[in-house]
């Protein structure tokens, strides 16, 4: 507690081994919304300390759930001033007896989280950060706004003299072994994460290296310890002009209690490189880069996406495009492979439909596009009756042995069967359906046929009409005469088949009327 130039410790009775505390901690887990919505899934997930720590981050505060502690920074009417608490036990017992306890502030939230984590078997320490930034707009900059008279203007950003959270020790199989170790989480309700007032756990190594795309809430925690500060004056014209700033005032003397003594143990180096060092500025610039990607829903690195044409009907020639974007800090040189293969609905790959490759250099923040032309002359004999083509784009960066891949499956549009009913459909009276299909292929269709069938329309059996060869861009035509057998809504199903186009289907709704004689007999 205190300030960076005047640090004071505060005694606290964590009491994680006291009678009844473990039962209360388990009750906290049983009151979290995830348990209430799906108890089996929640209990199964409790074997994962990442999951438990994130749940506790939300449940220690009472915002949006049945949590333990109510936060207040002004009015303490109806509760206990946060400064009066000296241990976790009283708070936990009050909660289990009467619900959310009033009131707490950051050190109370953190101490309580430490007690519960330790009781549940998760190694945990309380951490104090002096000059702690609260970055509300996630730009890693604390903007102090002033009017022309030097009066401070409110904008949401702030720097607290100190702020307290917890670190928990665990592995991070979701991130990789490089991010194992201490993980920050913050139960003080400041900002929402995934719609809930919680924060973390986030790897200290990710924070130190500016890896802001790593889960959870890395941008917010990074800003708490390493945001830059700018002072801006708003002129009468509405323009803002920077007049001062600092890259060193945020994140000082990050501290925890030393093991085996009441001394302060400085752990600033675990969160950040030395202020003003080349490494610290490098990490900050990388973090800014990652943060912009995160806000755009992007991740760091090379990224490929495949863009398909709007109209890709079987028989036509068309182009597909692969777009390679470099979200790295520096340029990348890689081999770009773009291929297409026929594929069945079961995922089995067939013959090649097209291939191209190139060696490309992509500057940071830019993109390169590669096109692949798919011609019917090549893909026509390769595709199956499913009319599917799998397109794959792969980049290979041999300098860092890095591979990226994007994949899409093209479903070629099939020609439409036009169905026209000639006259009204009436029970026991003949009606004709006219069928037309345009051959989209640049070659003849052989062994063509139309088949129709419909319950209540074709007496429960299919009707087939065979057609001679249909030339390129020519129409296949047929007509069927049938006598409906029942009144009401029916569906006429139509199938077209040939040597090169198969499984072309369509349908039409048919409302069959009662015959005049049937109506007369009914009357």
Image: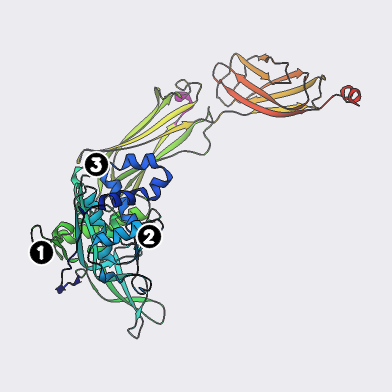
Q: Mark 3 or mark 1: which is in front?
A: 1
Relative to residue 436, is residue 130 depicted above or below?
Answer: below
Q: Mark 2 or mark 1: which is in front?
A: 2
Q: Mark 2 or mark 3: which is in front?
A: 2
Q: Which residues are magenta?
A: 374-380
* 410 sits to left or right of 468: left
Q: Quadrant of residue 418?
A: top right
Element assignment for label 3: loop
Mark 3 residue crowding within 10 angstroms, few (<14) / some (14–19) / many (20+): few
Inter-mark Cα distance, 2 to 3: 38 Å
User: Could you say where residue 356 lies in the image, as x and y percent from the top left?
Assistant: 35, 32
Q: Quadrant of the N terminus?
A: bottom left
Inter-mark Cα distance, 2 to 1: 34 Å
Q: Residue at x 30, y 43 (%)?
A: 46
Q: Residue furthest bottom?
A: 149
Q: Residue at x 47, y 27 (%)?
A: 388
Residue 167 in view here:
yes
**Does the residue at mark 2 contact the one at mark 1 (Cβ under 8 Å)?**
no
* 145 sits to left or right of 420: left
Element assignment for label 1: loop
- Per the image, the residue denoted by label 2 is 98
* 336 sits to left or right of 34: left
């Amino acid at each position: 507690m205190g300030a960076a130039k005047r640090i004071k410790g505060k005694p606290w009775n964590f009491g994680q081994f006291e009678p009844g505390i473990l039962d209360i901690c388990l009750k906290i887990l049983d009151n979290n919304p995830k348990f209430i919505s799906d108890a089996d899934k929640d209990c199964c997930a409790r074997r994962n300390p990442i999951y438990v720590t994130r749940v506790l981050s939300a449940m220690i505060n009472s915002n949006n759930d049945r949590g333990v502690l109510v936060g207040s920074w002004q009015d303490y009417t109806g509760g206990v001033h946060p400064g009066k608490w000296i241990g976790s036990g009283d708070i936990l017992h009050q909660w289990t007896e009467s619900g959310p306890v009033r009131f707490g502030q950051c050190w109370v939230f953190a101490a309580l989280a430490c007690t519960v984590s330790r009781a549940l078997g998760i190694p945990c320490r309380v951490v104090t950060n002096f000059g702690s930034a609260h970055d509300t707009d996630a730009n890693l900059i604390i903007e102090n706004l002033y009017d022309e008279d030097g009066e401070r203007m409110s904008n949401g950003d702030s720097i607290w003299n100190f702020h307290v959270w917890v670190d928990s020790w665990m592995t991070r199989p979701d991130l990789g072994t490089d991010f194992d170790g201490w993980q920050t989480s913050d139960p003080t309700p400041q900002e929402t994460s995934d719609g809930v007032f919680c924060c973390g756990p986030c790897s200290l190594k990710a924070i130190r290296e500016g890896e802001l795309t790593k889960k959870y809430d890395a941008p917010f925690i990074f800003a708490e310890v390493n945001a830059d500060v700018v002072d801006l004056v708003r002129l009468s014209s509405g323009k803002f002009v920077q007049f001062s700033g600092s890259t060193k005032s945020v994140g000082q003397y990050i501290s925890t209690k030393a093991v085996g003594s009441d001394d302060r143990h400085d752990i600033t180096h675990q969160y950040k490189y030395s202020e003003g060092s080349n490494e610290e500025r490098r990490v900050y610039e990388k973090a800014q880069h990652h943060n912009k990607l995160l806000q755009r829903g992007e991740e760091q690195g090379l990224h490929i996406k495949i863009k398909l044409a709007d109209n890709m009907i079987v028989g036509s020639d068309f182009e597909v495009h692969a777009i390679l974007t470099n979200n790295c800090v520096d340029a990348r040189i890689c081999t770009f492979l773009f291929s297409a293969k026929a594929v069945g609905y079961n995922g089995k790959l067939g013959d090649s439909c097209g291939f191209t490759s190139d060696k490309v250099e992509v500057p940071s923040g830019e993109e390169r596009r590669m096109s692949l032309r798919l011609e019917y002359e090549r893909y026509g004999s390769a595709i199956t009756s499913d009319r599917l083509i799998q397109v794959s784009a792969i980049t290979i960066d041999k300098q860092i042995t890095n591979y990226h891949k994007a994949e899409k499956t093209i479903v070629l549009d099939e020609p439409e069967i036009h169905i026209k009913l000639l006259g009204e459909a009436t029970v026991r009276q003949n009606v004709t359906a006219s069928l037309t299909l345009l051959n989209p292929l640049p070659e003849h269709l052989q062994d063509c046929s139309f088949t129709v069938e419909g319950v209540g329309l074709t007496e429960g059996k299919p009707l087939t009409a065979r057609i001679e060869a249909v030339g390129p861009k020519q129409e296949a035509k047929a007509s069927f005469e049938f006598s409906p057998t029942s009144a009401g809504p029916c569906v006429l199903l139509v199938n077209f088949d040939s040597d090169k186009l198969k499984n072309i289907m369509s349908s039409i709704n048919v409302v069959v009327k009662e015959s005049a004689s049937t109506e007369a007999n009914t009357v």
